[in-house]
Image: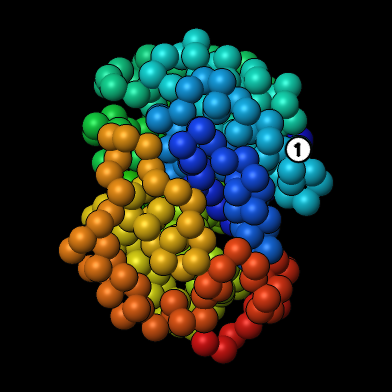
Amino acid sequence: MTSFKFGLVHAPLTPFSSAGIDFDLYGNLIDFHLSTGAEGLAVPTHTGESVSLTDEERRSLLEFAIKHVGAKAPVIAHVSESGTGMAAALATHARQSGAAAIIASVPYYWTPPQSMLLEHFAAIGSAGDLPFFVSNAPGEMGGSKITTELVLKLLDRLPQFSGLIDASHDWQFMIEVVSSARRARPDFQLVSATEYMISAGAIGATGVLSSLSNVAPRLVRELYDFCGEERFAEARSRQEDLARLYRLIQQTGVSGLKSASGLMGRDCGPPRPPLPTLAGADARALADGLAAIPGMRAEPLNWRYTGPNLGRTRGEHASAR
C-alpha cells in the first residue's frame, strides 16, 4: 500500500442551481480551495451535502473533482452510506476514478454493534483498495462510535486502514487510540475532523479535515502551519478566532456554512431541502458574528485570492495578522 499523508484537507461545499449541481461554479470553488492552502480535497463529505445527492451525482462530483484538480493535489473520496454494499460500490468507483484515498463513517440511520462495524469497514476498505480512513463522529451519527478495540482489530485485518478522522472532541479517547494504534502500526494517522487543532495536535494529530476553510481558509492554513511546528502559543489567536467561527456555524450547520460563504462573496447557491436557507434574524446574526471575529478581516472576499500564497510548506506562513 502506497503511503498517503492526510495533511490539511478541505471539505468543499456543493454548489446547486435550479438545474442541479453547478459544475462551472464547482470548478471555481475547487480552484479557490487549492489557491488558499488546501493540500487535498475530500469529495463529497457531509459538508458537501453528500446525503442529499443521488448516487450518480456523488460519482459525477468525484470524477469532476479528480479531472479538474489533475496532479495539483490528491482527491479523497467520501463513500459513507447506509449499507455496506452501497459504500463498497462507491469505494470501488473511487479507486477506478483515480481517488487517492477513501473515507467512510459508520452506517447511516442505524446503530450496529462493533462486530458489524468491523465487517462494514473491512468490506469497504477491501473494495476500495486505497488508503482508508474511518470517520468517528458520534454526535453526528446517533451515538454510534468507533472504539480503540475496533481500531486495533481493523489494523490487524485491513492493510489499507491508514487512520482515524475524529470529531468526538473526546481527548482521552484520542490519546488512547493514537498511542495504542501507533504501537501496532507506527505510521497510523490521527486526523482532526474539526479545527480545534491545538488540542488535537498536542495529542498527536497530523492532519485536519476542514469545513471552516469554506469561510476562513487563511485562518485555517495559518493555524495548521503553527500547530505543525508545535508553535502553540503563536497559534492561540488563530485558534480562538476559529473556535468562535466553529460555534457560530455549529448552530446552523451546512446552511450556515453556505450563508457565510455567500457573505464572503463566494455564493454557492442554497442548500438542498430539507436544509433551510438562512434568512431574517438568523442571517443577520451570522453576519454580525462573522464581523466580530478579528481574523476574518484578512480573509478573501471573492473567488480569487490575491494575497500571499498560502499553499506553501510549513514554516513559510505569514505570521502577521
- Vertical side of 1 occupied by 82: above or below: above
Kindly tell me whether residue 317 is visible in this rendering: yes
Which of the image's four quarters has the N terminus? top right
Residue extending farthest to the top is 85
* Residue drawn at x 56%, y 52% as measured from the top left: 10
- The one nearer the camera, 4 or 301, is 301
Question: Mark 1 is on which residue type?
Answer: Lys
Residue 72 placement, left or right of 205: right
Residue extending farthest to the front is 18
* Residue drawn at x 35%, y 40% as measured from the top left: 137
- Vertical side of 78 occupied by 189: above or below: below
* Quadrant of the image occupied by residue 273: top left
* Residue drawn at x 68%, y 35% as measured from the top left: 64
- The one nearer the camera, 269 or 291, is 269
Residue 117 placement, left or right of 301: left
* Residue at the spot of label 1: 67
- The one nearer the camera, 34 or 84, is 34
Specify few, some or many for label 1: CA neighbours under 10 Å numbering under 14, 14-19, or 20 or more.
few
Q: Position of residue 153 (x, y in %)?
A: 47, 24
Q: Position of residue 55 (x, y in %)?
A: 52, 20
Q: How many numbered badges does the structure rendering display?
A: 1
- Vertical side of 88 occupied by 166: above or below: below
Residue extending farthest to the right is 71
Kindly tell me whether residue 122 is visible in this rendering: no
- Vertical side of 233 occupied by 47: above or below: above
Q: Position of residue 263 (x, y in %)?
A: 41, 66
Q: Position of residue 17 (x, y in %)?
A: 49, 40
* Residue drawn at x 60%, y 48% as measured from the top left: 25
For the residue labelled by badge 1, is the local secondary structure a helix, a strand or a loop? helix
Colour pattern: rainbow
